Structures are given as structure tokens and as C-alpha cells.
Amino acid sequence: MDERRKLSHSAYGGINGEEYIPFIPTSQAMPELSIYSIIMGAVFAMIFAAANTYLGLKVGLTIAAGIPGAILATGLLKGLFKRNNILEANMVASIAAVGESIAGGIIYILPAIILWGLELKISTIVVVTLLGGLVGIFFVTPLRKFLIVEEHGHLVYPESMAAAEVLVNGSEGGSGFKTVLLGLGIGGGYKLASGGFALWSERPEWVMKSYQGAVFGIDTLASLLGVGFIVGTEASLYMFGGAVVAWLGLIPLIKYIGTGLTEPLFPSTQLISEMGASDIWSQYIRYIGAGAVAAGGFISLGKSAPTIIKSFKSAMAGLGKKSGEKVTRINEEPPITWVIGAAILVFILSWILPQVNAGFIGSLMIVIFSFFFAVVSARMVGIIGASNNPVSGMTIATLLFVTAVLKLTGNIGQKGMVTAVLVAGVICVAIAVAGGTAQSLKTTFIIGGSPKQVQIGMYLGLVFGAVVAGAVLLMLNNTYGIGSESVPAPQATLMSMVIEGVMTGELPWVLVFIGVSIAVFAELSGLPVLPVALGLYLPIHLSAGILFGGIMRTLVERKFKNDENMMKAKVEKGILISSGLVAGDALMGIVVAGFATFGLDVAFGTKILPSITQSPIFATIIFVALGILIYTISCKEDK
């Protein structure tokens, strides 16, 4: 078999990034930003923006778009247009992925305006998204070489590598593509049975009544198992460790100490004795997690400062390149003048446009915090993937500073709170888009595409996705009401509480600084701060699901530990099947969301033998069986 029918081992590391030879050599000319890729990518961006806006407002989670976008792009380009062009397919996948990014950025903060009984116009949503998206996409430019090329093999970018595998196997065909399709079918079928038909629970949990009502649970999602396999055990263990501290340490401690209180303990308005573990997590632990994530961001920025400066110097040096200096497709960057121009344009427009009206100080904070968290976001997706990028946590950290500064400068009351939402909204979109951009640029580096063309294409898709996401948000508000049981908008609810807390001086700073101290401890102990902080901030259910996928990969590695070449081959096969799992889960998630959108109740599992279908043990058994199946397929000999 031709070696180019699959990614080389060097795509995963083992060599210097500057020596890496991409799947499509730069000497081979192929179109990327074509009419096919632009139109198809824009359509997918709108679809994923709509689906993720709905799901995010409903359950507080979004589904990955890059990997399913890669599968859809490859299949349609080949099947419908007879164009077997992997660079075009990568462009479509990158544009599609921005639909998820902007949806996450919008839903985490902007609905707070509606929760306060004020009007949120679609023009405001679109302008906020376009401004945040512009700096989110282009602020990654001066960091790309360091994060993606120099850190090749060190920063994993798990979902980027999964997307690259999908693109390669989709364009080249062969057994690898069949493996991806198998994973796609398994992931989609599993999601339909659990999330659609409700044949088993997607979040089994157990309450330990004798241990202050502490809860342990696991998100039995095929996508989490797949991400865990791709990430590996090390990163998932750090996340799980942070979750153990929160859910089996801090939550029982708060319950133990606070049960005897006869009055609610700020910031909750409910007695601790009446609260369950999830209530304590929502009212107390999330502030601790937000403090840890914020501190991890500052620590990451401080440690990355020399390389950031180096990246900027390198980019600035590019202005003085001699005309004869060779620039290949793989290192074709947008000019640094674009980056500076984007910053200046966003600063001016945020100041003068009535949809934002941030003022001088607010506009300045938009540029500064967008860059800061773009750095953090771009690096974090290299560790845990864009699906688990804690955009809401970084937005909380942003709100703490933005709202405090606005209050100190006299911008208070309802007007000050709305300004805080709009300023943080632009930054939140920038955070989400920067992570998605870094993920797409990693895939582009592996495949051999042009960073510049991908970034241009992503912004074109962002324009279309912004309109659709805004329309869906307002439609859901008109139909159900944002903040209702049908559309609870959990992140936006929390953001509104943070803003009100800072403006009234009633934010639980003690909890925030507890999170900061835990992050400092992790750094001093030599632990990776961000994965631990993520574990603190996110439910233990999610970390447990990812860890289980990592364990499956470890079992595969141990089975073939005496044959390194065989082990690499089996792990790569496992990554392919896991990529399909993630994609199948995401695609079927859109279908399930469609059922809910059109009012179709297909969850007959809740009506047929609910004692079995809703049993946490049954759900766990099914999830373990799925893990064993993925392990078996990974280890199976190819015919």
C-alpha cells in the first residue's frame, strides 16, 4: 500500500515541526478556497451554528463540528462533485467548525440581556460576533508557528489529528476510511439509542448518602470515549483528579460544615442542608473552578510570554522579507498588518457602533482580553480539544475584570451591566473562535494547506453563521422564553449572576481565590494547571467519561507494548475508530436536536421498562460494552 494513503507517524511527533513533510507536499498545487469549498462550508457553518445554539441553550453543551464537517466535506466532494481534493475538504471542515465556535461564544453571555427583561436585537448579536470573530481568527496568527510548528508532537491537538485522519482516509479510501465509517455508524447509532430513544441514560450517577450526599457519575457519551482515547490517559487523569477534589472533597466538605446553618450561605439563596451535590457545585464550586481557570490562564500567559514575544518578533520580521524569499503554502501567513489592522478596527468599531457602544475603556479591554484569552484558548485546545475548551470559564474570568473596571470608572447600574455583557460578548466570541481557529490550523498544517486561506475562509463562514445563530436564539426566546425550563441557558444565567455580583459588590471572592490557590498549588507541584482547573470547573461526569476512553487506549498500548510498530498501528486504528465515534455522536446529535426543535417525542425508552432504561447500572454496562468494542476493533487484525 502506498504510504501516502495514511498519515505518517511523524504527523504525531517524533521530529522537529519544521522538518515535517505534510500529507500533500507544498510542491503539489491544489485549489483550497474555491467556490465549492466556500458555499459548502458556509452551509455547514449555518447548520452547525443552528444546532449548537439550540443545544447550548438547552443543556449548556455544544457538539464538535470540525470532525463531522471533515466527513461530510470528503463524502460530498467525492460523491456529488467528483472532486477528490483533500485541501478543499479541509477548507470546508474549517469553515464548518466556526459555526460551533460562534454558537458557543454567543450563548454563554448574550442571553443575560434577555434574562434582565431587556431586548436583544439580531443586529447586536451579529455585530458582536463579527467583531469577536475577527480578532479571534487573526490573533492566532503570530502564535501559529510556536503552538503548531515548534510544539509539534508536544501539544497533541487531539481533535485536529482526528479530523486529519478523517480527511486522509476519506480522500484516499482503503481500510482506514472503512474504520472511520464503522466508528461513525457506531457513534451515531449509540447516540440515537441513548439521546434520541432514551433506551439508557446519558448521565448515570450515584448518590453517597452516608458521605454528605456526594455524587459520582459518568457521562456515557460516545464522543467522550472517543476524545479520551485520542487524548490518552495522562491528560484525562489530571482532569479527573481536579474533579475528584471538587466532587469528592470540596462538595462534601461544604455540605458537612454548612448543614447546621439556619440561613443561606452567600452566594446561594438556599439552605445548604436543602442542597444536593449538583446545587453546591452550581452555587459554590463553579466559582472556585472559574478562579482556577483564570489563574491557569495567567500562569500560562506568563510562561508563554517569551515565546509570544518571539512569535511577534518573527511576524514583524516578516514585514521586511525580501521579495525573492520563498514562501510555501504551508507557511503562508496573513500579513502582520492584518493582525494589527483587525485590532485597530475592532477597537474603533466597538467604541463607535451603537450595537456595542463600549466606550474607550471598554474597547481597549476588548482588544487586550481578546488577545490574552486567544493565547490561552489556542493552547488549551492543543491539550484537550475544542469540544472541552472551557469558554464559559474564561468568560467568567473576563467578566470579573471587565465589570470591576466598568464599575470603578463610573459605568454602573443597568447601563453598566449591559455594557459588561457586550464587551464580554465580543471577548467570549474571540475566545471560542481562537480555539476553533487553532484547531483548524493544526489540521491544515498536518494536511499541507495554507493557513492564510483557511483563516479567510473561516471568517466568510462566520458571517453566515452569525446571522443564523442569532435568529435561532431569538426564535427560541419567542417560542419558549430564555431562562425557562425548556431553554434554561445555564451559562448565561451564571454570567448574569457574576455581573450583578460585581456591580453590587456581592461576588464570592473567597471562592474565586480558593480556586486561584489550588491553581498555584498545581503549578508549584509541577502539575499541568489547566487540565486540573478544568476538572475543578466541569462536572465529574464529563471527566470520568473522558478518562474511560483514555483507559481503553492504555489497554491497547499495553497489549502491544513489546512490539512498538504494531502498537503504533493499533493506536492509530483506535484513533480512527474514535474519530468516527466523535463524528457519529455529533451528527446524530444534530438529528436529535431536530426532533426536539420540531416537537417530535421519540424518547419511548422512558415509557418502556423505565426501571431498566433509566437505571444507572444499565447505562454504565452499555458504556463499558462500547469501550470493550472499541478496544476489540482497535486490536483486531486487518484482513
Image (cartoon, rainbow, N blue to C red):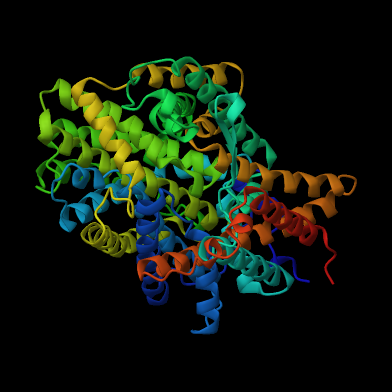
- Image quarter for residue 635? bottom right
Q: Quadrant of the N terminus?
A: bottom right
Q: Position of residue 405 (x, y in %)?
A: 20, 24
- Residue 427 is left or right of residue 29, and the answer is left
Q: Position of residue 150 (x, y in %)?
A: 57, 40
Q: Quadrant of residue 184?
A: bottom right
- Asked whether residue 553 is in view, the answer is yes
Q: Is residue 32 left or right of residue 557?
A: left
Left or right: residue 629 compared with residue 270: right
Look at 13% across and 50% down and name the residue there: 119
Question: In this rendering, does residue 336 appear at all?
Answer: no
Q: Nearer the viewer, residue 476 or 485?
A: 485
Please provide percent x and percent y for residue 56: 38, 52
Q: Between 43 and 151, which is closer to the camera in this rendering?
A: 43
Instruction: Residue at 34% x, 37% y: name it.
Output: 395
Query: In the image, is 591 to the left or to the right of 163?
Result: left
Residue 618 sits above or below residue 236 on the image? below
Question: Could you say which is closer to the camera, residue 322 or residue 466?
Answer: 466
Q: Is residue 177 above or below residue 64?
A: below
Quarter of the figure that contains the C terminus: bottom right
Q: Residue 510: x and y, percent?
A: 37, 16
> Observer-nearest residue: 310 or 125?
125
How many numbered circles are shown? 0
> Residue 413, located in which quarter of the rendered image?
top left
Q: Residue at x 61, y 73 (%)?
A: 171
